[in-house]
């Protein structure tokens, strides 16, 4: 009987040992397969070369505006009054500002832990909304029309945003005649009134340049040079037709041919470059 028991115990022990050996061998076989799969994945993974990709969240532009004025800002593409090229403006009920870019071609900004490749600064420079509307009034000067009809532009319909601007609505009659027709106000461009209004803006700009002490003494001390300088800035907001009329109206004299004037024109915008980034020291007009 004892012999039978011993044989049974030996058989059970042998079976357990055999089972443990099989499990150990099976686990040893599967482990290299996992390692092999990992090695293949590492080989197939693309190698990253060069600097890390730019994070789109760091693509910023720097804008300078008056304090507490950006919360409700919206920007519109509207034709520039001089050359009719599209330009960016911020317009709402209370303001009309031109977006002017100031900077150099090869410049970047360090912002936090990132580098902003666009090194330009955008300034919001105030401009009188009537300047933007003048070309439209001139185009329709032969007849009385409603403001909605005058400020009509299929390419840049945002010009109608001027109808919500308080400054524009208060001053529109300074360059137009107004009539009431069947309880509807209609307007027509008046050249004489427009020239008087331009003359007022010219005198205001001229006085501002002197008061802010931003010009060289040689310009301020010479009345004719100061007039030409001020008129040059004002002309950036007038089309060629109105520029010629305003020059005659204001009696702006050209420089003598033998005069060698060296005038710093850094404030004067090149209007043909308005759609691209431009360099300008803003002046109120």
Image (cartoon, grey):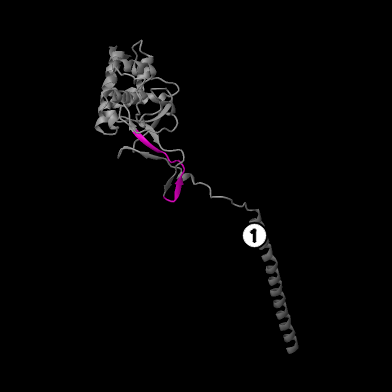
Give the quarter of the image for residue 166. Answer: top left
How many numbered circles are shown? 1
x, y (%) of residue 272? 43, 26
* Nearer to the camera, 20 or 34: 34
x, y (%) of residue 102? 39, 36
Task: Return the residue at label 1.
Answer: 38
User: Dot 1: within a 10 Å radius of its alpha carbon, few (fewer than 14), some, or many (20 or more) residues?
Assistant: few
x, y (%) of residue 253? 31, 18
**Quick one: which residue is furthest to the front in this view?**
258
Q: Residue at x 35, y 12 (%)?
A: 141
* Nearer to the camera, 20 or 218: 218
Circle 1: element type? helix
Q: Is residue 255 above or below residue 114?
A: above
Which span of residues is magenta-colored?
Answer: 112-124
x, y (%) of residue 42? 64, 57
* Nearer to the camera, 265 or 73: 265
Q: Is residue 25 above or below residue 210?
A: below
Q: Residue at x 34, y 24 (%)?
A: 232
Give the quarter of the image for residue 156. Answer: top left
Q: Is residue 2 left or right of residue 89?
A: right
Asked whether residue 148 is in view, the answer is no
Q: Quadrant of the N terminus?
A: bottom right
* Nearer to the camera, 105 or 97: 105
Give the quarter of the image for residue 83. Answer: top left
């Amino acid at each position: 009987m004892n012999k039978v028991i011993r044989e049974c115990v030996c058989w059970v022990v042998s079976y357990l040992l055999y089972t443990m050996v099989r499990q150990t061998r099976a686990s040893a076989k599967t482990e290299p397969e996992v390692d092999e799969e990992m090695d293949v994945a590492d080989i197939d993974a693309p190698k990253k070369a060069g600097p890390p990709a730019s994070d789109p969240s760091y693509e910023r532009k720097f804008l300078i505006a008056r304090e507490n004025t950006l919360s409700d800002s919206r920007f519109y593409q509207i034709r520039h009054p001089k050359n009719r090229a599209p330009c960016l403006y911020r317009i709402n009920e209370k303001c009309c500002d031109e977006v002017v870019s100031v900077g150099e071609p090869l410049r970047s900004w360090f912002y936090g832990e990132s580098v902003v490749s666009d090194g330009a600064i955008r300034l919001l420079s105030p401009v009188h909304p009537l300047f933007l509307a003048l070309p439209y009034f001139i185009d329709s000067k032969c007849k009385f029309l409603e403001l909605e009809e005058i400020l009509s532009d299929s390419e840049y319909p945002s010009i109608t945003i001027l109808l919500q601007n308080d400054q524009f609505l208060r001053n529109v009659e300074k360059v137009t005649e107004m009539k009431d027709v069947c309880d509807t106000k209609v307007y027509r461009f008046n050249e004489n009134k427009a020239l008087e209004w331009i003359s007022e803006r010219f005198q205001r700009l001229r006085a501002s340049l002197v008061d802010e002490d931003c010009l060289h003494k040689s310009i301020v001390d010479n009345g004719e040079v100061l007039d030409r300088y001020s008129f040059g800035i004002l002309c950036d907001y007038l089309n060629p037709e109105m520029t010629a009329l305003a020059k005659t109206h204001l009696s702006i004299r050209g420089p003598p041919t033998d005069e060698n004037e060296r005038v710093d024109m850094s404030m004067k915008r090149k209007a043909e470059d308005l759609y691209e980034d431009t360099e300008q020291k803003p002046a109120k007009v």
